[in-house]
Image (cartoon, coloured by chain):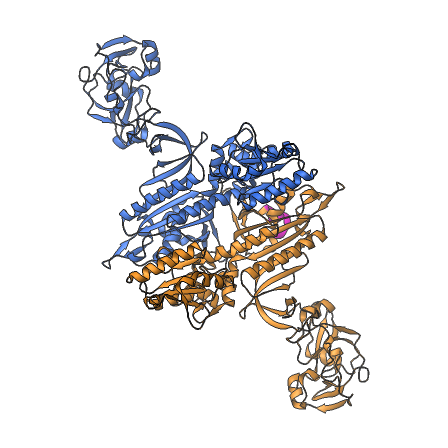
Chain colours: A blue, B orange
Amino acid sequence: MRASQFFIATLKEAPSDAEIVSHQLMLRAGLIRRLAGGIYTWMPMGLRVLRKVETIVREEMNRAGGIELLMPAVQPFELWEESGRGPQYGPELLRFKDRHQRDFVIGPTHEEVITDIVRREVKSYRQLPRNFYQIQTKFRDEIRPRFGVMRGREFLMKDGYSFHTSFADLEREYRSMHDAYTRIFTRLGLKFRAVAADTGSIGGTGSHEFHVLADSGEDAIAFCPTSDYAANVELAEAVTPQKIGAGETAAIEKCEKKATPGKTKCADVADFLNAPLTQTVKAVAVMAGSAREIGQFVLLLLRGDHELNEIKAQKLIGEFRFARDEEIVAALGCKPGYIGPVGFNGRIIADRAVAVMNNFICGANAEGYHLTGANFSRDLPLPAEIADIRNVVAGDPSPDGKGTLELCRGIEVGHIFQLRTKYAEALKCTFLDEQGKEQIMEMGCYGIGVSRIIGAAIEQGHDERGIVFPAGIAPFAVVIVPMAYGKSTMVKTAADALYAELLAAGIDVVLDDRDERPGSMFADWELIGVPHRVVVGERGLKDGKLEYKGRSDVDATLVAADEITGFLQQKLCA
Amino acid sequence: MRASQFFIATLKEAPSDAEIVSHQLMLRAGLIRRLAGGIYTWMPMGLRVLRKVETIVREEMNRAGGIELLMPAVQPFELWEESGRGPQYGPELLRFKDRHQRDFVIGPTHEEVITDIVRREVKSYRQLPRNFYQIQTKFRDEIRPRFGVMRGREFLMKDGYSFHTSFADLEREYRSMHDAYTRIFTRLGLKFRAVAADTGSIGGTGSHEFHVLADSGEDAIAFCPTSDYAANVELAEAVTPQKIGAGETAAIEKCEKKATPGKTKCADVADFLNAPLTQTVKAVAVMAGSAREIGQFVLLLLRGDHELNEIKAQKLIGEFRFARDEEIVAALGCKPGYIGPVGFNGRIIADRAVAVMNNFICGANAEGYHLTGANFSRDLPLPAEIADIRNVVAGDPSPDGKGTLELCRGIEVGHIFQLRTKYAEALKCTFLDEQGKEQIMEMGCYGIGVSRIIGAAIEQGHDERGIVFPAGIAPFAVVIVPMAYGKSTMVKTAADALYAELLAAGIDVVLDDRDERPGSMFADWELIGVPHRVVVGERGLKDGKLEYKGRSDVDATLVAADEITGFLQQKLCA
């Protein structure tokens, strides 16, 4: 492509309503333009990126046996009534009546349509399994669209649906899709994690989210850098530390009651007593039972540096709320800030990390006092209930035993679900098995936010000069920047020849023949994030040299003009 | 592709609501499935065809300098108010309110959006010309969707828009797009014609339609087989015949009044008088002027075998209606059926073909009588107004002087317009010229009905066994049909090897490894319209032969197994 024949629409400043860096840079680099809230035009530069992402997704889906089709964007609402999802979906489902007053929706997702197709077309186990997918523009009427293409209303999505004769076969396909997604995000050049996830409104059981790692991500993720383990922080299992805590090698101390006036928080108590925070135990008093019942008072024990994970606690004790001051006084005879498990005979649940502590510090159930050197068995019984009730922290052992956890933030760009029979049952999508018996199909579904990936890639890859695209999805792989293309015949000839040579080598190259000032051309291509730049100038040419600079390189390199194609090919394969 | 890994959904019978052959065959071949009226899923087989068409369109648009972008399907209604097109568009424009009660449309076309983009992004003559296009799913709420994808509500379209500093530059681009469209439809393998067309509701002046020729087409087209001339029959110019009509060499006859009792139609009069129909003149009496004025009585003269073209007549005399019996009697003293120009002193317009006649037959303005041997100058003056007021007929000279016209029917699949400044003016899309003066941009627009092309191709190419696709857009170029793939190791080995060999040669091949009955496999692939078939069977293999049959061939050919790839490559290049 010659830049003069293309359309470059870079901006010095991003519009003020662009809150996050990827949105700002996509506008400044001219990848997108806003038409309405959450609705963007993919400008020529942005569409090149979008198509590259789309192509990688398509190739890997095909390789994994996916069969592409294209379902209509407009769907009859009847199908949504049949699945029962219509009323449940809420106002981001765009509904309209056609000129004959029939109800339609602009499909934000296509479970109903594909299930309708399969129930009509597939009759026998011999036609199964099948995995259909499409890459399609979707619409969701988000109440507060923002972050550009990250949470837009109109967006490009790959949605796929698989159909099976058994749960075992669904599980096989689910693993295959997990692998395909791993290949997709690897080829896209992104740092990502597949994360065990809770199922959202799509329903069913068993699901993984694929997150692009970026500090600005909305989701907190725990992962193990030396293995594949990753999970949402809310779901990550906190396993018993292999090594027992601080007191492990210490001799058993005497249990003493120490005055800790005004020190109601573990951190303050530890400071005051000159002990590590990891030697304190925090008692969290809750009332189990729904808001309307008389609840049971429960004491949850956590290490002082740990935080309660309410989802985990709820799984153990059901609905609960934090106990009120008067309830705490009634149960322990002491106001909050100095409470502890010693002497309490009610229900206690100790976090796994607490159960292995000794010589710990905890509230003395007497105002202004804490105990030190507390030990299970001697000073109080080991609680009957020992469970995982805390959020994982960096440094925790990975639940797969293959390292220690780190924490990071992620942007969800893919999601795979085991839908099981939810839709197939509602829409009566059945097949005849080998015995001629009618059975409900098992279903999986597999989504990728194609346009969202681009925002996520930029959140992950940018610097003060602009976007740093992975080579596979940059709008161009290489840019040739000639110095004074319109004035120097020598430069023009050399730049044109290089352009032809790189095109012939199958390299995705743009020649900036706009004859702008060099600084302005450099700034444009750095903003746009093209990974490889070759400068053609008279000075270098006199020595048979061209100047190469990678997008993230600090300095340029001189390369012999007759070696540049090979040099670039090596860079592109790297 | 292996058929067992794909999804083949052929049907024995088409649903009864499919009226035309392309719709029936697309359903039977499993290319599409209906979701709602005018709304279809592109099944895997159909999507392959759609993508091939799309790719050819994209490649040729890029070659012609088009720059691809992707505008949103959802557009704010404000833009349609600004262009003035909103109220005018009618109920096929799908409007809806979002959850914040803002007005939107699902864009059936994108003049407003692209003009909005260009007015923001393009400021200077140095940024012009530009030709932007997109390939996008569109929605039009047709009142009576029918003919499958030929007149659907949701469809895939290529729409392009060019912007220019001058009309001359628009005309240059218009010719370039005309050439690009010609390359596109040629590469698609279709018999087509570019037809001079009247502008529709899109507005502006200067437009051509591209029609795929098919007997079932909705439009009547006149074209010259020995030149590029083609036009809608309503618009095709009927030029004066070079040769003067039937009476040319005959001596001037006497004008005689002959009794023609009950003969009120030219054909009956000619029969009765034993004269050729081409020697009769038909007088059509009309009242010029709009319905509310007192009109002027005008006599239009046409050769007996010609038909009045009302569009042409209207261009001459403005609005008109056919005269009532009492108005005819008042003007000519005779009731219709026997009227003629001789003796009438009012306004007469003679068609060009009439003006060169002599010794003609016409009504005598006396009930039951016609004149024979009438001649201009002697029996009546040559009318002051001689004009083209008839429809062309087959055999007319081509207006470009390069042959004679033929008539055919066509399906419109492309349309190019010179929009001029209609939208640019309404939306204030201006640029600064070389003198720094603000000027309105000139615009062109260029549409192709991508999904419609497939229906049109099938209307043009089918037989009693199914679709006959042009090779470039068939879902697969070659099908390998093994006889007893699952039973004969010899066949399986040979078929697998051939499949690998053809794939390696870059041939778009499908291996039918479904192990269906041969007749059923043959029927499927003939229905689907795959142009080349290779049968792998034990009998042939024993002699080292494979059986080749082209989709339209009557007989199969035996080809040596080790020559088949070259043989197919030749067929595919042909």
Q: Which residues are magenta?
A: B78-85
Residue A413 appears at what percent x and percent y?
43, 39
Q: Quadrant of residue B402?
A: bottom right
Q: Nearer the viewer, residue B392 or A178?
A: A178
Considering every residue shown, the one lying at the far bottom of the view is B259
Residue B532 counted in the magenta span: no
- The total number of labels drawn is 0
Residue B20 appears at what percent x and percent y?
48, 68
Q: Magenta segment, principal secondary structure?
A: helix
Residue at image point 66% right, 51% down: B443
Q: Is residue A403 left or right of residue B327?
A: left
Query: In which quadrant is the N terminus of chain A drawn?
Result: top right
Q: Quadrant of residue B199?
A: bottom right
Q: Measured along the vertical axis of the image, is residue A320 above or below residue B364?
A: above
Q: Measured along the vertical axis of the image, is residue B75 above or below residue A30?
A: below
Q: Measured along the vertical axis of the image, is residue B194 above or below residue B438?
A: below
Looking at the image, can residue B290 be seen? yes
